[in-house]
Image: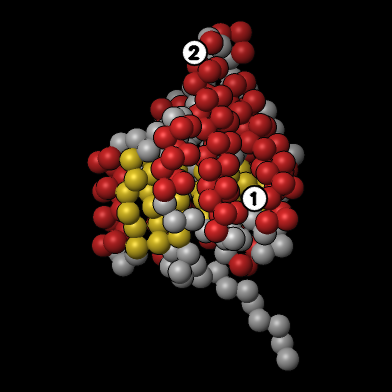
Amino acid sequence: MLPATPGFRLDGKRALVTGAGRGIGLALAAALAEAGADVTLAARTASEIEAGAAAIRHAGGKAGALVLDVCDTAATRATVAALPAFDILVNNAGTNRPSPFLEVVEDDFDALVQLNVRAAFFTAQAVARRMAGAGVKGSIVNISSQAGHAAAAGRPVYTLTKFAVEGMTKAMALDLAPLGIRVNSICPTFIETEMTRPSLADEAFRARVLARIRLGRIGAVEDLMGAVVFLASGASALMTGSALVIDGGWTAG
């Protein structure tokens, strides 16, 4: 008898996506919903996540909105503890404030570390505790960056935070493996979103980026949607502590 291909469907699974109001987060939420998950879109701006959830429902998916500031650790912990355990967490909330090393100011450093590292760590901890308490063998997907594998010039603090996310992913994977909870990361190259558009509007900068992306184009959110479904589903059942680098060849050399 031939082996059966593991399924990519997520029917009956509950997913939480942070930073889901727009851009990458909204696209990943839509991908999980299309695969059958009941998705909770979380972010600070109610209007954005409510519109996103409504769009997913209009397309036939299951989605709800959760107003949440993941930088508020106590609120995040209490909110997650009060909800049924999630099967999937997509730890997507993040930001960037590009600045050369010699010009980095403390406020920017603190803001990036607070959201990209501290909030991601404690959000994952809250969700994993709930998974463990309910006996859920879940999947946590940290949205990292190619900058977690190859330093980004002019973005030293962002690079620092994404290397931290990569290390955190591996450490979490080791600690949570005995509970059957998998932890992996997705590491995109430059993706055209509201956050990257100002930088990419600079023609010289865009040209430098395209010179490093061997496939010759800026990424789109659609390039990440299959990856998140893969990592959330049984198709990646033996993967933990790994990074899916979706960079068009940037880090290959």
Residue placed farthest to the bottom in the image? 1
Front position in the image: 81 or 239: 81
Measuring 60% from the left and 54% from the top, which residue is drawn there? 132
Q: Position of residue 94 (x, y in %)?
A: 49, 34
Measuring 42% from the left and 52% from the top, which residue is drawn there? 83
Q: Position of residue 166 (x, y in %)?
A: 67, 38
Q: Earlier in the sequence, mark 1 or mark 2?
A: 2
Measuring 53% from the left and 47% from the top, which residue is drawn there? 127
Q: Amino acid at mark 2?
A: Asp
Front position in the image: 56 or 247: 56
Q: Amino acid at mark 1?
A: Val
Residue at image mark 1: 183
Above or below 58: residue 193:
above
Q: Is residue 85 visible?
A: yes
**How many C-alpha atoms fall within 10 Å of the one at disc 2: few (<14), some, or many (≥20)?**
few
Callout 2: SS? helix
Measuring 41% from the left and 27% from the top, which residue is drawn there? 198
Q: Is residue 217 visible?
A: no
Q: Which numbered circle lies on residue 107?
A: 2
